[in-house]
Image (tube, rainbow, N blue to C red):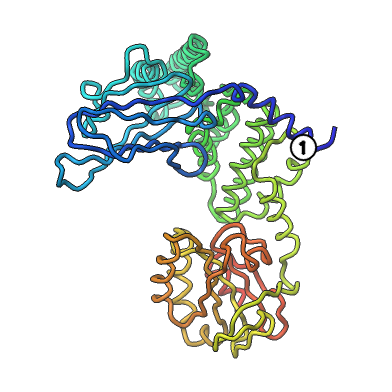
Amino acid sequence: MHFKTLIAALFMLAFQSQAQAQDVSLKIHLRGVHESKVSLQSLAGNSIRTVAEIPVIKNGQSGTLLVPADKLPGEFVLRFDYKQKADSSPYPSERRIFINKQHLEMRVNPPYVNNADSTWFQKGEKENALFATFSQENAKRKEKLGLLQSFLMGYDQPQSAFFQSGVEEYEKRRREYNAWLIAQAQQHPDVFVSHTFVFQHVPQIQWKGTEAERMQSLISTYFDGMDFKDPILTKTVDLKEWMNQYVNLYGAMATSEALRDSLFTLAGRRAIEKAKLGHPVVYGWMVDYFYNGYESFNITKGIQMLQPYLEDPRCLTSKRLAIEKRLKGIETLVAGSLAPDFPMKDEAGKPTAFHKYKTDARYKLLLFWSADCPHCKDLVAKLHPWQQQGDKKKAVEVLAISLDETETEIPVWEKAKKDLPGWKHSRAQGGINSAEANAYYVLATPTMILVDTKTNKIVALPETVDHLNAAVK
């Protein structure tokens, strides 16, 4: 079977049940306020997206949101922008809800949207009722386990018989708790929220030994309760939060940036190898998760570690093209290679090319950035004062290329660049898909490339101002 045909077949197999899925309605009965706008926002993926909206519902009236089948099952934010009176300013309130196959009705008083006495679903609603019941019982059971864990963590005589009896009692309760979780999920196999119970699993801890040894034992048992064969996991918000906790265990052991990068790469390899044995959708999700993390921290070793998984047809990653592009950039953009050329404008506004751009500075620093990107803001706050110093200003000219492209982003960039005098500012048409970004395989911001003015060869690809300073010296 051809590779692309096999991929398509696996996707069909993964979501064949969704082919018969139908849109689900959520009827809102509004009370207690003059009127409200109602929005339903999906929590799937890396950003919150509005999937349905009612512009206005008046007090005592009803409105219906239609939830697309391809977003189901899922966890959502139900948002109300309500007015207490006709001349009041809108005020927001939100509630997280689960939606699966069942058509829903809610009676809502927006200021008290999370109060069961003021806002409730129709009788017989399954997903959110089960989640509320489970959460109450789970909190009671986990509190007792947490008290024992805190005692064991803080006890200073681990060799004593008293401590050992505490360990035995903890292990007994831990096993009982995990068995209860499994039983709860098995009782409700058709309810979406039951698939989230697994994230409450408590892994085994090796209590004897140092704190570092305990951490290693926790890492080694972290995935013990997880069923990676369940594709519904990727529909939950919990999977990402659960993986963040796993990665943070490695981050806690890092004492330097180099060690952090190495540990995060190791975390990715171990997690992907586990997911590889499960469902292709979960396997692909795991590759996507670590790619996004490596891109955020610019961990090239981590991105290179992902390459073999792209060759596996079972890996249903949605980031295949992005990863391949990034790998090509890592291979091509190295110190000593000729910097890619691209069209630009000179100081007089006349068309020229990057290679022909004239400057008295020894180096040209390409900075790909976005004005509303937090990492970019942090970098620019350090880079601008560094570059404006006398000797640095003569040595390095900054060509700041904005990848902002939306109606919201561009005004932010227009304002931000006014606070960055002395730099040559331009905005790439097409943003991340522009000719400039494509030439340098840019998939995330900020990205810096230091280029020798005379030879147009790449000197360095600094990740921080400290790296840049070392390269200039």
Locate residue 122, reporting x and y percent: 32, 16
The residue at 56%/62% (across/down) is 431
Q: Quadrant location of residue 445?
A: bottom right
Label 1, on which residue?
Answer: 312
Locate residue 62, reporting x and y percent: 28, 28
Residue 388 appears in the rendering: yes
The residue at 52%/83% (across/down) is 392
Q: Is residue 171 above or below residue 460?
A: above
* Viewer-proximal residue among 111 and 456: 111
Check disc 1 and give the amino acid type: Asp
Locate residue 105, reporting x and y percent: 34, 21
The residue at 49%/9% (across/down) is 187
The residue at 51%/21% (across/down) is 195
Q: Quadrant location of residue 461?
A: bottom right
Decide if residue 330 is on the left or right side of residue 220: right
* Viewer-proximal residue among 116 and 158: 116
